[in-house]
Amino acid sequence: MISFSIPMKPVAKGRPRVTKRGFTYTPKKTADAEKIVALYGRQAMGSEPPSDFPIFMDLDFAISPPRSWTKKKTEAAIVGKIFPASRPDLDNYCKLVEDALNGICYKDDSQIVRLLACKRYALRDNIFVSIQEA
């Protein structure tokens, strides 16, 4: 089992873009976030090779509440009375992490057979990742 924390604001996987000449590229914000997630994944794996086995993955996306909120509303969000039920979608957060860890923690994200994920408010932005062989 491998668990690690990434101290960054969660970023949703952006859709591929196409130039006027027909070239496809990944948006910079997505590519930069994937590099950071991959770096933390490599550090957590150390010298271990990517897994060949089915994977159980748990993802927890902690998002700091907007600064414009009142203290009362912020406190309610931190204790779990208010959830970030707005865009970006949870599955787009997950897709970025899954793709970033391809070839690092597992050979391909098709090996993920169980995915538990949540997005919630917290004092600091963070992504918590836990990967376990099934």
Image: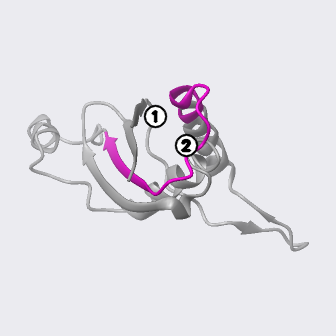
Residue 48, given in percent of the width and then of the height, sits at 58, 32
Circle 1 sits on which residue? Answer: 8
The amino acid type, in three-letter code, at marker 1 is Met
- Give the quadrant of the N terminus: top left
As for residue 58 lying within the magenta part, the answer is: yes
Q: Quadrant of residue 127?
A: top left
Q: Magenta part of the protein: which range?
A: 41-63
| Residue 105: mark | 2
Q: Is residue 79 left or right of residue 52?
A: left
- What residue do we see at 55% from left, 39% from top? 37
Seen from the viewer's position, the closer of residues 79 and 127 is 127
**Badge 2: residue crowd in 10 Å (few <14, some 14–19, many ≥20):** many
Is 82 located above or below residue 64 in the figure? below
In the image, residue 44 sits, relative to residue 129, either above or below, namely above
Mark seen at residue 79 = none
Residue at 32% over, 45% down: 60
- Residue drawn at point x = 62 percent, y = 52 percent: 107
Task: Find residue 123 and report its horizontal and vertical position in percent.
Answer: 25, 31
Residue 61 lies in what quarter of the image? top left
